[in-house]
Amino acid sequence: MTSKEQDLRAGLIEWRNVKMVEEDLDGDTFFGPQLIMSNKILDRIIDLAHYAKLTTPASILEQTGWCYSLDYGSQIIELIQAYFPPPPEVLPPPPAVLSPSTTINQTNSGISTVATLPGNAESLPAAEGANRNSKRAARKCRACGSNLHICASHILNHATMSINTRC
């Protein structure tokens, strides 16, 4: 366990003990603080907090099955975020916008269209990726050679498909 996880564990145990007093359950010596949150759920919360999987009380309920997650989940989320702050949102860069002006370059293999990006002198070949995808072979079943399905479809009943049933 990392030091952050150990600190979160100590914080959850302290929260659990405070809740026992607040709910007037501190006299229960049989179950003790595990009446509010078992050690198994506490450990699961720590594991999930490490990977930022708990963001709402509903996510605590989904991931742990803790019966009090809708009652105390917001307090647990605040406690988790004190030790594991949420990562900052990283916005993707804006897509490159091609200018309406394109130039035609003569190459040894033929003519290629080049589009220029606004604000930069960089150029991108416009049709290079399109040619690569157009040469892709059609998918076929390895067993029978049909192009109506691939091998994973052999699980289906062949009577419903109009294919050669030798596969």
Image (tube, rainbow, N blue to C red):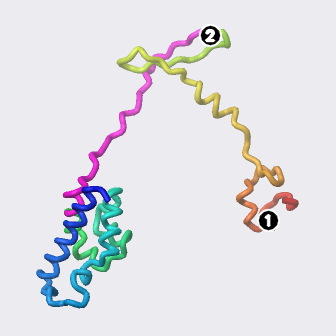
Main secondary structure along the magenta-highlighted residues:
loop
Pick out the residue farthest to the right. Answer: 166
Q: Secondary structure at mark 1?
A: helix
Residue 152 pos. (x, y %): 71, 58
Q: Which portion, as a residue range, is magenta?
A: 79-107
Residue, disc 1: 158
Compared with 26, 119 (above or below) is above
Which sits earlier in the primary sequence, circle 1 or circle 2?
2
How many marks on residues? 2
Q: Residue at x 28, y 49 (%)?
A: 87
Residue 44 pos. (x, y %): 35, 68
Compared with 52, 117 (above or below) is above
| Mark 1 burial class by Cα count in 10 Å: few <14, some 14-19, many 20+ | some
Q: Quadrant of the C terminus?
A: bottom right
Magenta segment includes 85: yes
Q: Residue at x 27, y 77 (%)?
A: 37
Residue type at the position of mark 2: Thr
* The disc label shown at residue 4, or none: none
Q: Secondary structure at mark 2?
A: strand
The image quarter containing residue 156 is bottom right
Residue 28 pos. (x, y %): 19, 90
Compared with 140, 123 (above or below) is above
From the viewer's perspective, is 27 left or right of 44? Answer: left
* The disc label shown at residue 107, or none: 2
From the viewer's perspective, is 167 left or right of 137? Answer: right
Residue 65 pos. (x, y %): 36, 76
The image quarter containing residue 4 is bottom left
Magenta segment includes 110: no
From the viewer's perspective, is 148 left or right of 19? Answer: right
